[in-house]
């Protein structure tokens, strides 16, 4: 992985930026020199190229070191760095993106929670319905069982077969 840094000499940092790289690719070198050439222009001119970063304090255009994600403080402090737009500093951009990302993540978690809760509520409703139906079937079965018992008792009484003593019929003979 190649890393690039800018070393500034103490005389005039806007005009004498020296580029020190460790094996960068040809495209990266081209972009670095292009961004450095825009140091004597305005912020708007510098930020027309997305690979450039404008440092407000030194008024220089620097190649944006994408390998580090955030530009190092030695290049330019985050609150003075501009990238993409001159009116938004890098620190504000990072905070805004973090807040938006956090809101999106919280919204997704709330949606997942609500969906699971609604699904569980639906499952509980279904279970309650099934329990009510099972209870209803059990009551109907008990009623049928009682009817059958009554009917069998009537038949036993009709033919003299009482349930109290099953051998009584044999004793009378």
Image (spheres, rainbow, N blue to C red):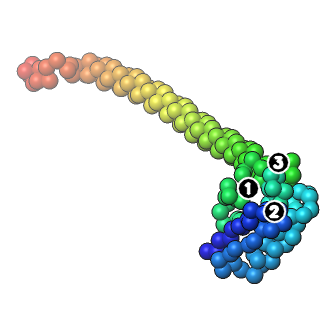
Looking at the rendered image, the disc whose residue lies closer to the viewer, 3 or 1, is 1
* Residue picked out by circle 2: 12
* Residue 66 location (% of width, % of height): 70, 65
Residue closer to the observer: 125 or 154:
125
Decide: is 94 above or below 145: below
Say which residue label 3 marks. Answer: 88
Q: Which mark is residue 76?
A: 1
- Residue 91 placed where, x, y %? 73, 47
* Disc 3 residue crowd, few under 14, some 14–19, many 20+, Cα 10 Å: some
Q: Is residue 103 above or below residue 138?
A: below
In the visual, does 107 lie left or right of 157?
A: right
Q: In whole angstroms, how far apart are the C-alphas of marks 2 and 3?
A: 26 Å
First-in-chain label (2 vs 1): 2
- Contact, CB < 8 Å: mark 2 with mark 3? no
Dot in front, 2 or 1: 2
> Which residue is located at x 50 percent, y 29 percent?
128
Report the front residue among 138 and 86: 86
**Regarding mark 3 in the picture, which secondary structure is present there?**
loop
Q: In the image, 141: left or right of 20?
A: left
Q: Are marks 2 and 1 in contact (CB under 8 Å)?
A: no
SS of the residue at dot 1?
A: loop
Q: What separation in Å lies between label 3 and label 1 (alpha carbons)? A: 15 Å
């Amino acid at each position: 992985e190649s890393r690039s840094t800018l070393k500034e000499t103490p005389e005039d940092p806007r005009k004498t930026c020296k580029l020190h790289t460790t094996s960068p690719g040809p495209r990266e070198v081209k972009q670095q020199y292009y961004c450095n050439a825009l140091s004597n222009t305005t912020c708007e001119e510098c930020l027309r190229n997305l690979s450039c970063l404008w440092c407000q304090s030194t008024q220089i255009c620097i190649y944006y070191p994408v390998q580090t994600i955030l530009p190092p403080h030695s290049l330019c402090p985050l609150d003075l760095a501009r990238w993409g737009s001159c009116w938004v500093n890098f620190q504000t951009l990072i905070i805004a993106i973090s807040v938006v990302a956090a809101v999106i993540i919280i919204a997704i978690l709330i949606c997942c929670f609500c969906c699971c809760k609604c699904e569980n509520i639906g499952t509980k409703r279904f279970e309650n319905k099934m329990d009510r139906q099972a209870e209803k079937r059990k009551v109907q079965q008990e009623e049928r069982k009682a009817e059958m018992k009554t009917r069998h008792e009537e038949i036993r009484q009709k033919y003299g077969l009482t349930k109290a003593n099953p051998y009584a019929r044999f004793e009378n003979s």
